[in-house]
């Protein structure tokens, strides 16, 4: 008998126990994530099926029971690796949260944890991550400052346990900067210029002139360093900047305009490619039911 195929079905949610984090409970088959990046650590656990993704120049398959961590700011994709699709749970955890936890584990300040560009195959860790995610998802209440229902003590303890195990077993030091011919100062200056005003039109020629390069060389340098052309990187930054206002309940159309998208449909199209759901549904997933 053929295995049942997964549907494209996703729910983003949040918890007062993990300020600044987002969580995702989802299954996918048809949806394909275009190249994108997150400002947070993406810590998924594959529950069934398998996902394939491109990341840091390699191609990987994450099967059930694995934890394919994605580091902040790193471009990656995502699509099914088998006919049925895949089902997973994902934590999007702020850099400050993970760095602070690393420091507490070592009893001394630590550089931000960095995880290998590979699928982590650690069955015990996968069980811990999935358990923490399920327990947090089961916490309800407190939408308007009321009491939490469920077991927040168990949920928060499970989260600390899971992420401590991830860091202690698998974290590396942040890799050295890419070769100097990438020219980090120019790349940083271009990023600064792209981020300065997300609503202002900006041509490649203007961007290149700011760093003393031709349009051709500026585009090539930026793409080599970030694995994205400047316009795509800027759209990713717009999407990241949209999350805060969406969490605060700002209307989707207003967020789209404030972040520099031409209209709401343009915003929705890019948002769905990155998050697998339209912005209105993402916004509704405040996670405290």
Image (cartoon, grey):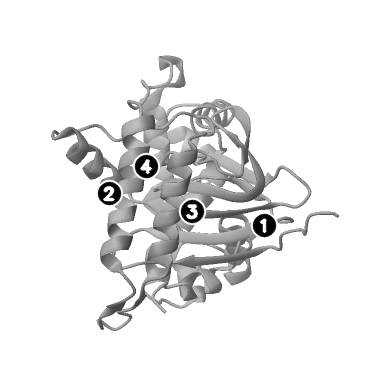
Residue 15, quarter of picture: bottom left
Structural distance between the alpha carbons of marks 3 and 1: 13 Å
Q: Is residue 159 above or below residue 56?
A: below
x and y percentages locating residue 54 in the rendered image? 62, 35
Q: Secondary structure at mark 4?
A: helix
Nearer the observer, 160 or 244: 160
The quarter of the picture where the C terminus appears is bottom left
Which label sits in the foreground, 3 or 4? 3
Q: Which residue is mark 1?
A: 28
Q: Is residue 240 above or below residue 67?
A: below
- Say whether marks 4 and 1 touch (CB < 8 Å): no
- Residue tagged 3: 90
Q: CA distance from mark 4 to mark 1?
A: 35 Å
CA neighbours of label 2 inside 10 A, class few (<14), some (14 to 19), many (20+): some
Residue 65: image tag: none
Whether residue 279 appears in this view of the structure is yes
Mark nearer the viewer, 4 or 1: 1
User: Mark 3 vs mark 4: which is more N-terminal?
Assistant: 3
Q: Tell me the residue that label 4 is attached to.
A: 192
Q: Secondary structure at mark 1?
A: strand
Q: Position of residue 260 (x, y in %)?
A: 49, 61
Residue pointed to by mark 2: 97
Alpha carbons under labels 2 and 4: distance apart? 25 Å
Which comes sooner in the sequence, label 3 or label 1? Answer: 1
Residue neighbourhood size for the residue with mark 1, other residues' Cα within 10 Å, grouped as few (<14), some (14–19), many (≥20): many
Do the residues under discs 3 and 1 have CB atoms within 8 angstroms? no
The mark nearer the N terminus, 2 or 3, is 3
């Amino acid at each position: 008998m053929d295995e049942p195929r997964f549907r494209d079905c996703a729910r983003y949610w949040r918890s007062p126990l993990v300020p600044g984090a987002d969580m995702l409970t989802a299954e996918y088959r048809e949806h394909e994530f275009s190249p994108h990046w997150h400002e947070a650590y993406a810590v998924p656990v594959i529950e069934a099926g398998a996902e394939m993704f491109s990341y840091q120049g390699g191609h990987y398959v994450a099967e059930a029971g694995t934890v394919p961590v994605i580091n902040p700011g790193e471009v990656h994709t995502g699509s099914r690796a088998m006919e049925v699709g895949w089902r997973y749970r994902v934590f999007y955890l702020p850099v400050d949260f993970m760095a602070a936890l690393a420091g507490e584990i070592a009893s001394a300040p630590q550089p931000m944890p960095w995880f290998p560009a590979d699928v982590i195959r650690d069955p015990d860790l996968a069980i811990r991550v999935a358990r923490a995610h399920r327990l947090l998802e089961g916490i309800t209440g407190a939408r308007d400052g009321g009491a939490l229902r469920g077991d927040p003590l168990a949920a928060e303890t499970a989260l600390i346990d899971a992420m401590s195990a991830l860091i202690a077993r698998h974290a590396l030091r942040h890799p050295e900067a890419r070769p100097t011919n990438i020219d980090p100062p120019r790349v940083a200056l271009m990023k600064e210029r792209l981020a300065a005003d997300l609503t202002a039109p900006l041509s490649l020629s203007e961007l290149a002139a700011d760093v003393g390069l031709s349009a051709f060389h500026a585009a090539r340098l930026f793409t080599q360093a970030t694995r994205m052309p400047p316009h795509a990187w800027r759209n990713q930054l717009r999407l990241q900047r949209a999350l805060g206002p969406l969490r605060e309940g700002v209307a989707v159309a207003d967020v789209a305009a404030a972040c520099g998208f031409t209209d709401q449909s343009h915003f929705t199209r890019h948002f769905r490619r990155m998050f697998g759901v339209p912005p209105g549904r993402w916004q509704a997933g405040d996670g405290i039911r």
